[in-house]
Amino acid sequence: MSLEKEDWLYEISAKKKLIDLNLKELWQYRDLLFLFVKRDIVTVYKQTILGPLWYLIQPLFTSVIFTLVFNNLGNIKTGGIPPFLFNLAGITAWNYFKVCLTETSTTFTKNQNIFGKVYFPRAIMPISVTFSNLLKFGIQLFIFIIFYIYFITTGGYDLTPNSKLMLFPVYVLMMAMLGLGAGMIISSWTTKYKDLNVVVSFAVQLLMYISAVPFPMSEIIDKKPEYAWLLEYNPLAQIVEGFRHITMDSGYFTWWGFFYTLVVSCILFFFGLIIFNRTEKNFIDTV
């Protein structure tokens, strides 16, 4: 007995539209998405001595180094905020974007064996990485809150969050979309150009220094106004400064910068998803 086309549950085809987000199929495979998230979390901590403590050690040591180099030796002011806490806030926000970008940028090359054997929407893999990295972000956010409370209770600092704290989930979403969008684009390119992985590692390190992570944006605006546009039009700098602003009521914040970053994040995510979906149909021939 033959089945009519309208009776099929799924239709898998190599043909793609010019612009295809494939959101419906991603929703149909949501259970697989949750399985990949669980797998990523379990495998990270399996056979490790310190487990999730690694995600506390890295931002703490980086914050100490930034405090010694930029604040103590470089004499960079932080606007009345404890330099260590200032750096920890920037590193916490930056790290989530960084891991989303670096871990999704190798999706095709790292998972070619799975992709070559069974079909599912390939975009599930980088999206699952973004969700699983929320646990790392949560751990680092927790240590930030601990030091936040410490400086308020023992140091006498006025670090009261402002009314824009409700925008915190939006900032997390923008970090995820920027990292995921850029990572999917790079992953699509690395199917043909393998040396891009080396370039990405180097570029991410440089990008941190033009994203207002180790210094406040106001320092550049005051001392080097001719270079201020590099930060003002950098969505990552807007996110880092915005994160400091909503949590410690300090830093450079404008509504124009917020909505500009939101629009750029959405565009980059959807553009990356389109390129990723178009690459998945023939990547196996070049990877």
Image: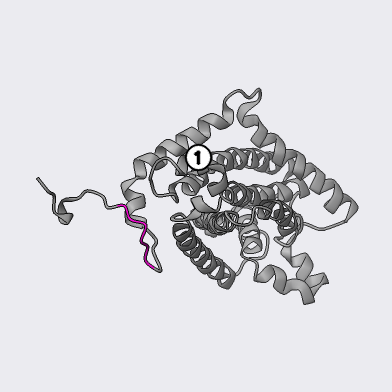
Q: Is residue 127 magenta?
A: no
Q: Position of residue 15 (x, y in %)?
A: 36, 61
* Residue depicted at x 63% and y 61%: 236
Secondary structure of the residue carrying numbered label 1: helix
Res. 158 in view: no
* Residue depicted at x 63% and y 64%: 238
| Total tally of numbered discs in the picture | 1
Residue most extreme to the right: 73
What amino acid type is highlighted by mark number 1? Asn
Magenta part, dominant SS: loop
Quadrant of the snapshot with the N terminus: top left
Residue holding disc 1: 113
Give the residues in magenta. Answer: 12-17
Q: Position of residue 74 (x, y in %)?
A: 88, 56
Q: Position of residue 243 (x, y in %)?
A: 61, 55
Q: Badge 1, how many Cα within 10 Å: few under 14, some, many 20+?
A: few
Quadrant for residue 133, please give it: top right
162 up-or-down from 52: above or below:
below
* Residue depicted at x 64% and y 42%: 144
Residue most extreme to the bottom: 226
